Image (cartoon, rainbow, N blue to C red):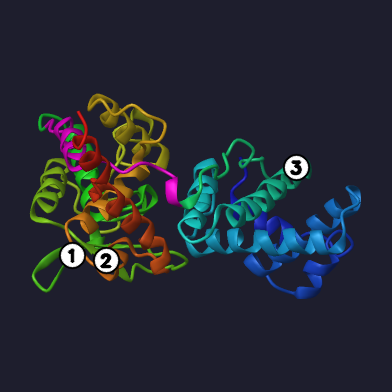
Amino acid sequence: MERWSDMMDRVTAMSTAAQPAMTEAGANGLEAFKKYAADLFQEWGKLRNRTEKTTATYTRNVRPFLEYLAARQITHPTPDDVAAYRDHLAENYKPSTVGAYLAAVKIFFRMTADAGLYPDIAHNVAGVKLDRGHKKDALSRAQAQDFLNTGKDKDTLKGLRDYAIMRLLLTAGLRTVEAVRANIGDKRTEGGHAVLYVQGKGRTERTEYVKLGPKTDRAIREYLAARGETDDNAPLFASTAHRNAGGRMTTRSISRIIKDHLKAAGLDSDRITAHSLRHTTGTLAIMKGKSLAAVQEVLRHRSVDTTRIYAGAASRRKNNTEDMLDKMFQ
């Protein structure tokens, strides 16, 4: 498979006759690639008899994805990266907007595959089906504890790692992609408290952090001590797979680990996934009296409207009106 950076270089080096708009721009890398993407969509629009407005919309909608890859220095995008981008969008936009942006990405990779430039890595990436308020179920406190209880294997490196990941996602509300991209050096101390810096949305630097509770901090420290890795640039959570031992994990592998432990806890449902842990973080925090502003800060939502989803879920769980009415009758 061709590297993304190589593809960008090859696109930039194409002849003026083949890519006039790009050559006229006189730029390498991202800007040249945006120009090439625009040319591809223009050709696509002509072949399918689409209006200029439609073509312009698709061109505009694919640009954030190219910027997303460049900001994260992703040089070899995979289906996991497309799925992570979809999840990134879903945190801040309504499903119809996510669908529009993802559709542009899918068409783009269909065209790069047809042109022999890059495989169609977006073909099998699912879209957003559920509305924002009901994407995934949150766990109750008892269910969350049952989930954690399945991961207390302290005898293997994998067991230590998995338990640390489980606690981190549940208590700090990390997304799987944030856990994947975390490095050992991102674990630091702020004001005497253990923290983990995470790469925020649309940012190239890790400027935001989550606090690590004592038990979660200990779980991570025990895992790192057993692993014996000290390089700050090494991944915080490393693969134990034979083909990628010591390398960076994928969002898919973390999601699979979480799903396996959820099933072991008796929580086998399509509506309960790794992302449910993030929902659980927000819902349980609000149920325990934390303010919307506090939960927004922990989950790093750009808009408090997103955080209100958890407030609604928490309020509904605490409302026992039906039980009261049920007890009124024999």
The reply to whether residue 278 is in sight is: no
Query: Which residue is painted at 20% across and 48% down in the image?
Result: 229
- Classify residue 62 as left or right of residue 76: right
Q: How far apart are marks 1 and 3 (CA)?
A: 45 Å
Q: How far apart are marks 1 and 2 (CA)?
A: 9 Å
Q: In which quarter of the image is the C terminus?
A: top left
Please state which amino acid type lies under the numbered disc 3.
Gly
**Residue labelled with disc 3:** 116
- Left or right: where does residue 108 sit relative to residue 87? right
Contact between marks 1 and 2 (CB within 8 A): the answer is yes
Residue carrying label 1? 188
Disc 2 target residue: 209
Pair 1/2: label in front: 2
Q: What amino acid is at disc 2?
A: Tyr
Say left or right for 291 vs 65.
left
Q: Position of residue 182 (x, y in %)?
A: 31, 55
Magenta highlight range: 133-153
Identify the amino acid type marked 1: Arg
Q: In which quarter of the image is the N terminus?
A: top right
